[in-house]
Amino acid sequence: MIYRALIKEIPTLSKTTVYNTLNLFVKKGLVIPIAIDEQETRFDIDTEPHGHFLCVKCGRIYDVGKCSALFDKNEIDGHKILECRVYLRGICRECLKKQ
Ligand SMILES: [Zn+2]
Ligand SMILES: [Zn+2]
């Protein structure tokens, strides 16, 4: 998707360049890879802690749980938390409306 959006402006762009740049962004903490979908890796520019909800009907991904108390913790049962990833799957509110 990113490649298709950029190729119009930069005709010499290669997919490898896009991947390498994205990996660099991940390393720098500018984007977060989301592994909710096995088919493709998606990237999130919102690096604030939050969860993701994947709709199994339309495939849309929603940002959820920004204020969840879980993300405020930095330890749980004596374990130090370095990363907290929350993935939820279900049917989104838009698809529920259509049912
Ligand atoms: Zn949906
Ligand atoms: Zn997100």
Image (tube, helix red, strand yellow):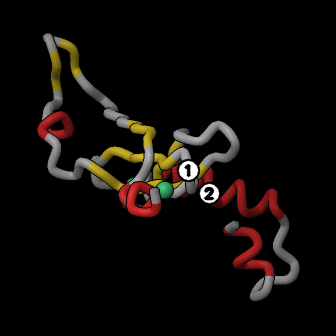
The residue pinned by badge 2 equals: 22
Residue 12 falls in image quadrant = bottom right
Label 1 Cα crowd, 10 Å radius (few <14 / some 14-19 / many 20+):
few
Coordinates of residue 92 in the picture (x, y in percent): 41, 53
The verdict on label 2 being within 8 Å of ligand 2 is: no
Q: Is residue 70 above or below residue 59?
A: above
Q: Quadrant of ligand 2?
A: bottom left
Q: Earlier in the sequence, mark 2 or mark 1?
A: 2
Number of the label disc, if any, that sits on residue 57: 1
Give the answer, above or below, for where 81 lies relative to 4: above
Front residue of 4/60: it is: 60
Q: Secondary structure at mark 2?
A: helix
Residue type at mark 2 is Leu
- The kind of residue on which mark 1 rests is Lys
Disc 1: residue Cβ within 8 A of ligand 1's nearest atom: yes
Q: Tell me if residue 83 can be seen.
A: yes
Which residue is pictured at 64% across the width and 37% down the height? 38
Instruction: For mark 1, give the secondary structure.
Output: loop
Residue most extreme to the front: 99
* Residue at left offset 77%, top offset 62%: 17
x, y percentage for residue 42? 58, 52
- Give the residue at x 52% y 57%: 60
Horizontal and vertical percent position of residue 57 = 56, 50
Drawn side of residue 93 relative to residue 89, left or right: left
